[in-house]
Amino acid sequence: MSDITILETERLRLSTWTGTGVDEVHALHADRAVNTYLFSYGDDWSRDKAEGRVAMWLREFETVGLGKHRVSLRTTGEFVGRAGFTPQESQAPEISYSLAQPHWGHGYAHEIAAGLSHWLFRTHGYDHFIGFAHVDNAGSRRILEKIGMTPTHQGDVEGLPHQFYRKDRPAE
């Protein structure tokens, strides 16, 4: 099965998962530094967990047009990480991204988050979306704020304290 391009930014491509996706997601979340602010239990993802997540993200995209997708460099196709929206039953979708450590510090997280924000409002009818970041994850919080998200409240996610954000659809 070939992948489907969801969106392209200046340097990045967001696409659906293909055969290598499970290995890429497994390697991404085998890095404890990537997981630092994501999971209170701090465990690496097993290959089975990565396989289940990729399958879930593909189903979400097929059924509601949202999900986490593969982020790669446009020039080489090199895997950078995962990003997208988690559909929520009772509220707006949630934006998230996780990048492999070699790709930190290049502005890729901001670039893909901004691209996703524009894409969601252009292609879906949501009036807003949410996001959250661990209270100590200054980099991720800064990215959410740079794409125009507003802090709303703090709460617990996976046993860790997080700052929640909201971004409303821009007025036309």
Image (cartoon, rainbow, N blue to C red):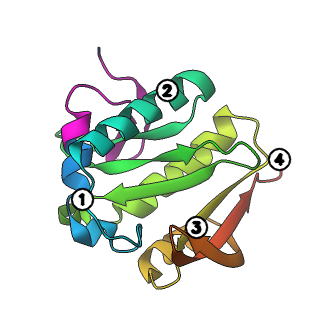
Residue matched to label 2 = 59
Q: Residues within 10 Å of mark 1 (few under 14, many from 20)?
A: some
Q: Write the residue at 25% across / 72% down.
A: 33
Q: Write the residue at 28% across / 65% down.
A: 43
Residue matched to label 4 = 172
Q: Residues within 10 Å of mark 2 (few under 14, many from 20)?
A: some
Furthest residue to the right?
Answer: 171
Circles 3 and 2, Cβ within 8 Å, touching? The answer is no
Whether residue 6 is visible to the viewer of this picture, yes or no, is no
Q: Write the residue at 33% across / 46% down.
A: 12
Distance from disc 1 to disc 3, alpha carbons, whole Å, reads 19 Å
Whether residue 33 is visible to the viewer of this picture, yes or no, is yes
Q: Measured from the top left, where is residue 105 in percent x and y?
A: 28, 71
Q: Residues within 10 Å of mark 3 (few under 14, many from 20)?
A: many
Q: Measured from the top left, where is residue 31 in percent x and y?
A: 20, 64
Residue matched to label 3 = 132
Furthest residue to the top?
Answer: 1
- Give the tally of numbered discs: 4
Q: Measured from the top left, where is residue 108 in percent x and y?
A: 35, 59
Q: Is residue 32 left or right of residue 39?
A: left
Quadrant hosting residue 103: bottom left
Question: In the image, what residue type sits under mark 2?
Answer: Arg
Residue matched to label 1 = 100
The N terminus: image quadrant = top left
Q: Is residue 15 left or right of residue 63?
A: left
